[in-house]
Image (tube, grey):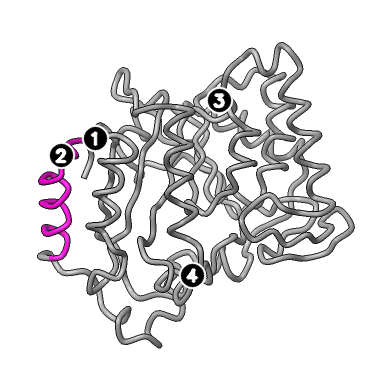
Amino acid sequence: MDERLFREGKLKQVRDILLDNLKKCRLCPRQCNVNRIDGEIGFCRTKRHALVSSAFLHFGEEPELVGRGGSGTIFFSYCNLGCRFCQNYTISHLGEGDEVEAPQLATMMLALQKQGAENINFVTPTHVIAQIVEALCLAVEEGLNLPLVYNCGGYESLDTLRLVEGIFDIYMPDVKYSDNTVAERFSAAPDYWDVVQEVLKEMHRQVGDLVVKDKAAKRGLLVRHLLLPSRLAGSFKTLQFIKEEVSPHTYVNIMDQYRPCHEASAFKELSRRITMDEHAEAVEYAKRVGLHRGF
């Protein structure tokens, strides 16, 4: 995080704006307009306080996030996407987790730092960005000084991203689709591709290409792309866009770990795992268009 935000009091100003926005929530593209402060529920089903499923040192993330000490991962419950194949559906759909207030969340961050974490990795932060910044105001005051990772599904509000500029060091969106029709069918996000293109460009504008020092990421954009069976994710179009419109130096993790979860078995297209050929095809295409980091 840019330390000037804290020293100059701007972090608290951002906190106050975000919390006020919860009264008529428009923090993500859903634009639900519900009063979360008073307990109204929108698409994300989250009220005033965030729910946390777990907080631990994660050694299964990208090597650049894990470094030597592990990624200090905090998993938030619920989500602003409705993926029918969600691999964490008990967390993201069923809300498995416990409600935490700002002091508790700040304590989790500081505990992870004390355990040797390379960063604080906020998983599914979009719908709880106000609560995260509220807790950061406390944690930074108590000495939190690690890189902050915004680990999301890519379905973000540009207004919100611009408001939090300077807070997050590493943006890590999982770009899921390059076709709005497919996104609507499988994630209830009919404008997903329109949104994520602008989101990627804004994230890159803020933090640039991924910077790694001493084998650990310090700042920049890291894009994940989960392959889906039968090219449903539109990987070629996604990779071409990243190279041409974001940066040819973008770090891209082309993930092959898809497996049918949640409601996926109800859809023939989603009812099988990725083949080795499908993964090799996507990696080869990434190289062909000029991407060269990650995979």
Name the amino acid, label 4: Ser
**Residue 66 to residue 23: above or below:** above
**Residue 218 to residue 16: above or below:** above
Which residue is found at the position 32% from the left and 18% from the top?
A: 213
**Residue under pointer 1:** 248
**Residue 11 to residue 89: above or below:** above
Report if residue 285 lies within the magenta region. yes
Which quadrant of the rendered structure holds the N terminus?
top right
Name the amino acid, label 1: Pro
Which residue is found at the position 15% from the left and 45% from the top?
A: 289
State how far apart marks 2 and 3 are (Cα): 40 Å
**Residue under pointer 3:** 114
The answer to whether mark 2 and mark 3 are in CB contact below 8 A is: no
Which residue is found at the position 10% from the left and 46% from the top?
A: 288
Indicate which label's residue lies in the foreground, 1 or 3: 1
Name the amino acid, label 3: Lys
Indicate which label's residue lies in the foreground, 2 or 4: 2
Give the residues drawn in magenta, as a range. 278-293
Indicate which label's residue lies in the foreground, 4 or 1: 1
